Amino acid sequence: MDVQAITKYARMSHQKVSEITRQIQGMSVAHALDVLQFTPRKSARIVLKTLRSAVANAENNANMAADTLVVKEAVVGTGPTFKRWKASARGMAAPRLRRTCHVKIVVAEVPRRAPGAAPAPKAAAKAENKPAEAVKPEQK
């Protein structure tokens, strides 16, 4: 089961936030939290807050254990842009674009294996899907 958290209208451009979200995709939640805590960027704080919210949603609403969660998806979309003006030289005005973004993080639970259990046999699965051998044409 997947659980998500969304932060809307974060006051940062989506390019800056997407650099951080690309780093944590596929990581375990514990490792992703460590990476985000020690990344010295404002965008890392926004993603960290969203990830903590997703973990809390998984624990409280879906009864999942936090140590079995992985970051399945971390997506950043553009939000509305605030158009502002600033006075510039010679009585003119220069535009300032205040960009926003929406951060969506999806966490999923990885099933635990019993201690000492063998991984799923891959060789048997490959043998079943083995293609038939090609028949060579007879040479004249």
Image (cartoon, rainbow, N blue to C red):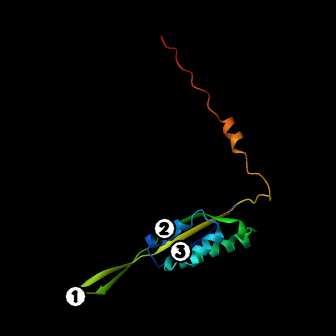
Vertical comparison of 52 with 130: above or below:
below
Residue 40, position as x, y percentages in the image: 50, 80
Q: Report, in whole angstroms, how far the alpha carbon at label 1 lies from the one at label 3.
A: 35 Å
Q: In this rendering, is residue 103 above or below 137?
A: below
Do labels 1 and 2 touch, CB within 8 Å?
Answer: no
Badge 3 local density, few (<14 within 10 Å), some, or many (20+)? some
Quadrant that contains the N terminus: bottom right
Would you say 24 lies left or right of 12 here? right
Q: Who is closer to the viewer here, 93 or 129? A: 129
Q: Amino acid at mark 1?
A: Ala
Residue 94: x percent and y percent?
Answer: 28, 82
Q: Is residue 66 left or right of residue 76?
A: right
The secondary element bearing badge 3 is classed as strand
Q: Name the amino acid type tagged 3.
A: Lys
- Identified by mark 2, the residue type is Gly
Q: Tell me the distance, in whole angstroms, between the alpha carbons under discs 1 and 2.
A: 35 Å
Name the residue furthest top: 140
Q: Residue 37 placed where, x, y %?
A: 58, 78
Residue 32 place in picture, x, y as percent: 60, 70
Residue 8: which disc?
Answer: 3
State the mark number for residue 89.
1
Q: According to the image, label 2 marks what residue?
A: 77
